[in-house]
Image (cartoon, grey):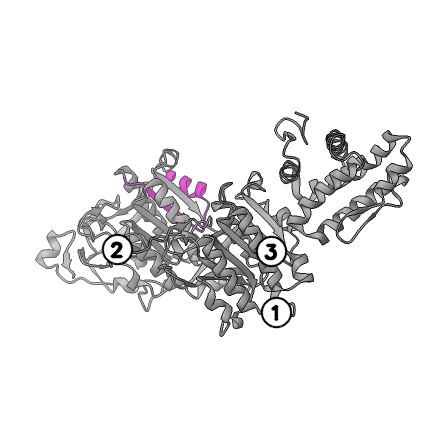
Amino acid sequence: MTAFPQMRDLAHRLLAYEAGVGKTSEPMESPALRVYEKLRQNLVTFAGEAAFESLAFRALTQAKSETSALWAVQVAADGSLQGLGEIDTQTGMDKDRAGEEGIILIARLLGLLLIFLGEALTLSLLRNAWPGEAFDDRNSAYGRKS
Amino acid sequence: MSTQDKVMINKLPTGVPGLDEIVGGGLPEFSFNIIAGAPGSGKTTLAHQFVFANATPERPALYFTVLGESAIKMLRYQQQYTFFDPSMLPGSIRFINLSQVVLEKDLGAVLDQITKEVEKSNPAVVVVDSFRTMVRKPQSDMDLQSFIQRLALFLASWQATTFLIGEYAEDELRDNPIFTVADGLFWLRQTAERNSIVRKLQIIKLRGQDSVPGLHTFRITDAGVQAFSRTFGLSAHKRNPPSDRRLSFGVPELDKMLGGGVREGDSVLVAGSSGTGKSVLATQFIAEGIRQGEPGIVAVFEERPQAYAERATSLGLDLETPQKEGKLEILYLRPLDLSVDETMHSILSAVQNIGAKRLVIDSLAGFEMALSPGFRADFRESLYRMIFALTGIGVTILSTVEVDESFTEFPFSTYSISFLTDDIIRLRYVSIDGQLRKILVVIKMRGGNHAKDIREYEITDKGVVILGKRLTNYQGLISGIPVYSDRPKSPDETSLDTGMEHKT
């Protein structure tokens, strides 16, 4: 998938953003889970739980092929993610690596959205989920930090 | 009650080219509509066009998807259309999926969910796609009719214009109580006729609006649904009063035979067999119009515009320059599955674009062949509507038609359409003095004077040129095999080139 490096950058930005927010509001929840949940809430609203669950399952399958650390993570019927928090706990001593799994999973999910919805609608969805973030689709492929 | 006291119903643009005219100027605001039809008939696309044409950030559109097509896939495909503006999502257009509620709960819960979302967003437009999928699930507390009635009442109170989309077969139209609730019922059909697909739209009902009755053809293109009204978008136009102005053919002797030229707004038929010069005469007609400042349209079906212009050049007629100057458009219409309405739309657009006063259809046989087979049965009726509509706005139409040369009869057209035309000019071959020569006669001229002469003509590098006086020394010219007659000439024959006959 040619767009994957850009999706990784975008996923990294979103996780970094949520990590910053999490320091003050919800320090115990993983940034990757918060990003995932925001995407889930927005996508479930317009596409339904079943559609999101299918998409998330596919993204997780792709991500598992990249990192074995995600082997125990599961997607529930409502599309919620189970087991990602445990990875954070297990790899608590190596926070960079834990972040890496989250980045891979979110990047894969964003990649699927890009394939199915296209750049404009994907960015539109992200703007809705993160109203405070700037996703500039004019000057770069998938966004630039403001 | 005076007109001022009556409630004004705003008409909303449908976003579908041609549909506003069909529904009587636009869709009534706050109306509750059903779009019905078979899968693939364009229901969702039509609803999307309406949504994109009317949603704003202040009064957004809520698009509820139920079971059936996934919203992700629907958006994937719909964004291919040119009307789809991704920047309108989700600010102005919000997609909300109700499948979970439908699967796990009942219609009451669906209504509650829609109510909640409507109260939250205050939408101008609400679409439920497809509400039919809810019917197929066994219901408990609320039946579908009750659901539809309550939904209609609620959405009207919230000043929303609503579309329910449903897959319905033709026979389900009868005795269906759901349809009685709707203010508007749009039925989309698509049928295969031989190798062509024909799409038709019918406004079965539309409260408070004077919609155009009947079946209207439509096409789905990159721009979405495009509808073609049976009245060709001219229902709002008043017919021009008959004109006394005469238009020159660019052939002086023929103008004389026509009593000064073709009457403006007439429909002229030039009939003859292959090679008699029908297209040449048509080209001279259009070129003369341009010379006199009357823009023209030539609809060709049998040769490409470039070839048509090059042939005109060989006759000393320049059709290239007026095309560049926007005074002439040569339309090539031959995709082989057109409806007359689509053809008319192309012609009318061209007429309106350049303010055309003259139109040449070259030829009717080519026109018929360009139509989808399903429309050929209605060719005469369609032709009548087309000619009536165009001449009504003052366009003078010249159509050519090929007729089989016969030496026992003198047909004017193979289509029995002479009643559609005001004037008929017949060209034919005759055998004279060991040569195959050509003669021309004005058969009919509605409401005007025309010559009764049979004149010989030639096609030269200047086009059709009428020769000398009328042929007085032959009997049976129109049979094609005349007999030389050595009878003495009458006094009028010796002096007249053109005799006039008054016809009413």
The percent coordinates of residue B10 (x first, y second) are 38, 51
- Expressed as whole percent of the image width and height from the top left, the position of residue B301 reads 44, 51
Q: Name the residue under label 1.
A: B141
Task: From this view, report whether residue B198 is shown above or below residue B354.
Answer: below
Give the chain letter at badge 1. B
Q: Would you call the spot at circle 3 few (<14 residues within 10 Å), some (14-19), or many (20 or more)? A: some
Asked which secondary structure carries label 3, the reply is: helix
Q: Residue B8: where, in percent of width, then height? A: 33, 53
Mark toward the viewer: 2 or 3: 3
Mark carried by residue A63: none
Which residue corresponds to the image point at 49% horizontal and 73% vertical from the top-left? B174
Camera-nearest residue between B44 and B435: B44
| Left or right: where B199 falls relative to B426 | right
The Cα–Cα distance between marks 2 and 3, rounded to whole angstroms, is 40 Å
> Magenta residues?
B294-315
Name the amino acid type tagged 3: Gln
Q: Which of marks 1 and 2 is nearer the N terminus?
A: 2
For the residue pair B373 and A10, the one nearer the viewer reads as A10
B131 lies left or right of B99:
left
Q: Where is residue B148 in the image (x, y as percent from the top left)?
A: 53, 64
> Do the numbered discs 3 and 1 sit on residues whose CB atoms are within 8 Å?
no
Is residue A21 something that shows in the picture?
yes
Location of the N terminus of chain B by quadrant is: bottom left
User: Label 1 neighbourhood size at 10 Å, few (<14), some (14-19), many (20+)?
Assistant: few
Of the pair A90 and B315, the residue shown nearer to us: A90
Residue position marked by numbered label 2 in the rendering: B3
Number of numbered tags placed on the structure image: 3
> Disc 3 marks which residue?
B113
* A94 part of magenta stretch: no
Identify the residue at the far front of this view. Answer: A25
Q: Is residue B408 above or below residue B442?
A: below
Residue type at mark 2 is: Thr
